[in-house]
Image: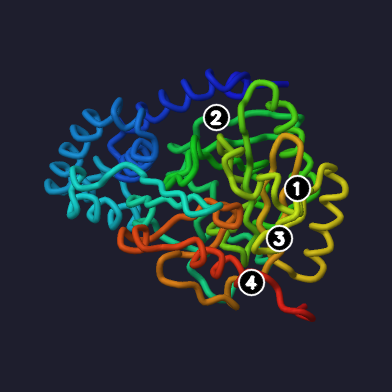
Amino acid sequence: MRHGLFLNEDRFKQTFAQGLQAILQQPDLGCFILACANAYADPALHRQMLPDIERQLALLQQALMAGALDTGALTATTEDKAVFLKIVERGLDTIPTVQYRQLGHWRCQLNHLRTMRPLRMAGKTEVSLYQDYSTDSFNFNKPFIQKECLWEGPWQGKQLSWYYNKFPFARYHGLLVPERDRQQPQYLTRSAHELIWQLLEGCAEHFHGLGVGYNSLGAFASVNHLHFQWFLEAEGLAVMSPQWRHNGGSVAYPLACYRYADPQQAWQAISAWHQQAIPYNLIYTANSLYAMPRRIQSQITHQDWTSGFSWSEAGGEIVVQNAASFAELSAGDIEEEMGKLNRLVGEA
């Protein structure tokens, strides 16, 4: 069964934009942040949505000053209020859309709104590969997060939910949550792995450059609820270049990377990493999985220009924390940080 959202790329992009417009109109600080961050990630969406964003910002500021949060006329989590006040303090007119810079093999992005996001589990130093799901922690079953859901329905006999990424760093960035009501922690299961593989195979003919990322706990996953990250234009990631050894080329990638064309072989590797408590980042495409086992985040001290290396950075799309670093960074700086992910000889 194919839902209309996954029918073709044009239909998906149209639905994506319409959903953002609808979310923007809600009297909710979190919805405003989501719509704003997604618009600023895409110049075309930004041009289209900016007048409405400016109007909604003024209305929300007025409501906040009038005490609407206290009366329930305006909703916000503590995190959302903090981010909203940062946007107000800085001013929309001083925030540019996402900027890009190519450094050797690597594409850097300066994403001002993403630097305002709460880190949640990605900011914790002591994180194990498996942790029990907690209803008290942020998860995709929270009532307030349902406003951010673009679509939910059956796919290959399983319930699948598609949420906007509140602080996107990829094109048409969303979160795929399989069977969210089962309250599964961010610990990859074989059935979820196979579901994502089948989804990509099913969409490949009608989507250009569709990819799905995954971070295990300990590899900068920020939410302990089983989820994947949908994005378009995956072919632009450096990890997919034919020059690298994992793609049959002659050049060594800066960190350990394995490419699998068969879902069962891929699962054998992932299962082995589970048994050894090795964290990893994954990037699924229509015909391959790029898998990167790595050191746990608590063992790595990164430079201040990065908040950590998730599947995106491991794949060659580098999110930079500030304008000064964005201007001064070199390809060597990036490769040095990537190398920190590599496991030591004999490391368990």
Q: Residue at x 87, y 46 (%)?
A: 264
Residue type pointed to by label 4: Ile
Residue at x-position 55% and y-position 56%: 313
Which residue is under mark 3? Answer: 252
Q: Quick one: label 2, few (<14), some, or many (20+) residues within 10 Å?
A: some
Q: Are marks 4 and 1 in contact (CB under 8 Å)?
A: no
Instruction: Identify the mark nearer the N-term, 1 or 2.
Output: 2
Apparent side of residue 238 relative to residue 78 in the rendered image (left or right): right
Residue farthest to the front, as pictured: 250
Check residue 86 in the rendering and tell me which mark sits there, or answer none.
none
Q: Is 38 on the left or on the right of 157, as rendered?
A: left
- Amino acid carrying label 2: it is Trp
User: Counting residues from the N terminus, which is met first, the one under dot 2 or under dot 3?
Assistant: 2
Q: Which residue is mark 1?
A: 247
Give SS at disc 2: strand
Q: Work out how far the residue at label 1 is from the one at label 3, CA to CA, in angstroms.
A: 10 Å
Front in this rendered view, residue 37 or 346: 346
Category of crowding for the residue at label 3, using alpha-carbon neighbours closer than 10 angstroms: few (below 14), some (14–19), many (at least 20): few
Marking on residue 296 = 4
Q: Secondary structure at mark 3?
A: loop
Task: Report the residue marked by disc 2.
Answer: 151
